[in-house]
Amino acid sequence: MARLPSAERRRQLTEAAIRAMARDGVPRTTTRSIAAEAGVSLSVFHYCFDSKQELIESVITTITGHYVTVVKEALRPRASLEETVRAGFQAYWEHVRAHPDEHMLTYELTQYALRQPGFEHLARRQYELYAETYLELIDQLRQTMGLRLRVPAPVLARYLAAMTDGLTLNYLVLGDDDAWSGILDTVTAHIAGLVCEP
């Protein structure tokens, strides 16, 4: 087994944990099964992560990073604010449709953390991370397009996090791909109404 830098090994184990948890469920995923998924020894896992809490936080952060990367790339300024916002939502939505198990895992992680004594702070951290992520995306748009907001940025960020959280869960439960273009158009028009162009 090749020696990898610690950060790279942690990344490898986190991605293995995401695959294992999405396939087997959070409670049934063990450190041994994660190590096997990554093709490393159990001692390597324990060298990289001090606790299951630390691993779960890394999983939450990594999954969020997966879709934030595609949304950031899509949020380049377009002909209008609505087109720009719609492109960001579309990029997120395509990620949900391409990786439903990964998004379903985020809800399972929340429930697991809330029910597991001593893990509650991870659920709170997960949702704080969502709001922080939206705040970063809002700031990106404000800088590139010179936008002014009709509501405070932290309020808009929390609102976007809550809205996409609900929409994602709704899609995971109901599916119905045909309905989502109209839903995203409605959401886009609503969010654009909370922003003033320069």
Image (tube, helix red, strand yellow):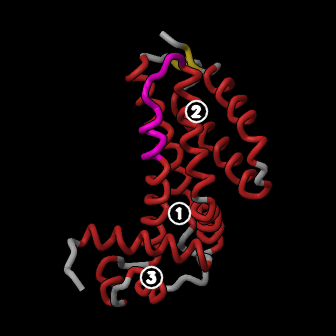
**Residue farthest to the front, as pictured:** 178
Cβ atoms at labels 2 and 1 below 8 Å apart: no
Q: Position of residue 176 (x, y in %)?
A: 78, 50
Mark pair 2, 1: CA separation: 21 Å
Residue 122, relative to residue 148: is it above or below?
Answer: below
Q: How crowded is mark 2: few (under 14 residues within 10 Å), some or many (20 or more)?
A: few
Mark pair 2, 3: CA separation: 40 Å
Q: Which of 195 and 126 is in front in this view?
A: 195
Asked whether, in this view, residue 123 is left or right of residue 51, the answer is right
Range of magenta residues = 68-80
At label 2, the amino acid type is Val
Which of disc 3 and disc 1 is earlier in sequence? 3
Q: Is mark 1 on a helix, strand or loop?
A: helix
Which of disc 3 and disc 2 is earlier in sequence? 3
Disc count in the image? 3
Asked whether, in this view, residue 58 is left or right of residue 91, the answer is left
Q: Nearer the viewer, residue 61 or 172?
A: 172
**Residue farthest to the top, as pictured:** 198
The disc placed on residue 195 is: none
Is residue 162 magenta-colored? no
Residue 164 is at least partly visible in this image: yes
The disc placed on residue 155 is: 2
Q: Where is residue 195 in the image (x, y as percent from the top left)?
A: 57, 19
Identify the residue at image location x=72%, y=57%.
172
Residue 38, relative to residue 43: is it above or below?
Answer: above
Q: Position of residue 40 (x, y in %)?
A: 34, 86
Q: Residues within 10 Å of mark 3 (few under 14, many from 20)?
A: some
Identify the residue at image location x=58%, y=71%.
22
Residue 157, relative to residue 171: is it above or below?
Answer: above
Q: Name the residue under label 3.
A: 37
Q: Name the residue under label 1.
A: 121
